Amino acid sequence: MASPDMLVNALTTMLVTLDPPGLAPVFLGLTVGMTGIQRRHVAFRGSLIAFGILALFALFGSNVLGLLGISIGAFRIAGGLLLFWISFEMVFEKRQERKEKTSQAAITIDHLHNIAVFPLALPLIAGPGAISATVLLAGAFPGPFDRALLIGVIALIMMLVYVTLLVAERLDRFLGVTGRAILTRLLGVILAALSVQFVLDGVRSAFNL
């Protein structure tokens, strides 16, 4: 059974990887010109679809790796390196810039149709980092009850993402450019430490240390 420390680690990893405050200004850019009701609909649908994607990877991600002949140790190392790159982008303000470019491209190409699916649910919420973190965490939650707890953690984080998107305008005004930069960099440093831990766990697993 998963220990409280494992649950806290899972909660922290998912929270930092998804970065709800960082999604707020991007969401505002995606939904410019929409009414409050339309924004709520997009936020709910996007959060629900992202939850479904991450829940599927939590349940079947390790099985897919097994079919491909990839050990969980190897995936932990690869996933940890990917998360470290995301943390690097967060600390040096590259990730927010990339997210904003993604949102601008969607407005031009799709004219706000199906925004909840693309790019909000995928790749802004359930992006490569979140999917990698989910599969990595699933390796530490092997039993059916443990997986149910992990999905519960994902659901809790997704509810937080949904609430953040609902109050995106107020949150963006409250944090401002400086507050957002400080928070993003702080979360980036935490994610860097977590990613290094994933790599160390992967090395131990791969070499049976």
Image: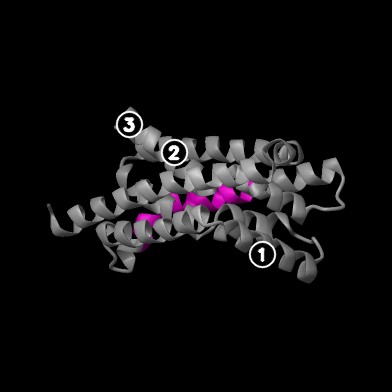
Q: Check disc 3 and give the amino acid type.
A: Asp
Q: Kindly report the distance in space between the C-alpha atoms of the residues bearing marks 1 and 3.
A: 35 Å
Q: Is residue 58 magenta?
A: yes
Residues 103 and 128: in front is 103
Q: Earlier in the sequence, mark 1 or mark 3?
A: 3
Residues 113 and 89: in front is 89
Q: Is residue 199 left or right of residue 164?
A: left
**Residue ID for mark 1:** 102
Residue 182: x, y in percent?
Answer: 56, 43
Residue 166: x, y in percent?
Answer: 73, 38
At mark 3, the secondary structure is helix
Q: Earlier in the sequence, mark 3 or mark 2?
A: 3
**Residue ID for mark 3:** 5
**Residue ID for mark 2:** 12
Q: Kindly report the distance in space between the C-alpha atoms of the residues bearing marks 2 and 1.
A: 26 Å
> Considering the image in quadrants, where does the N terminus appear?
top left
Q: Check disc 2 and give the amino acid type.
A: Thr
Q: Does the magenta stretch include residue 17?
A: no
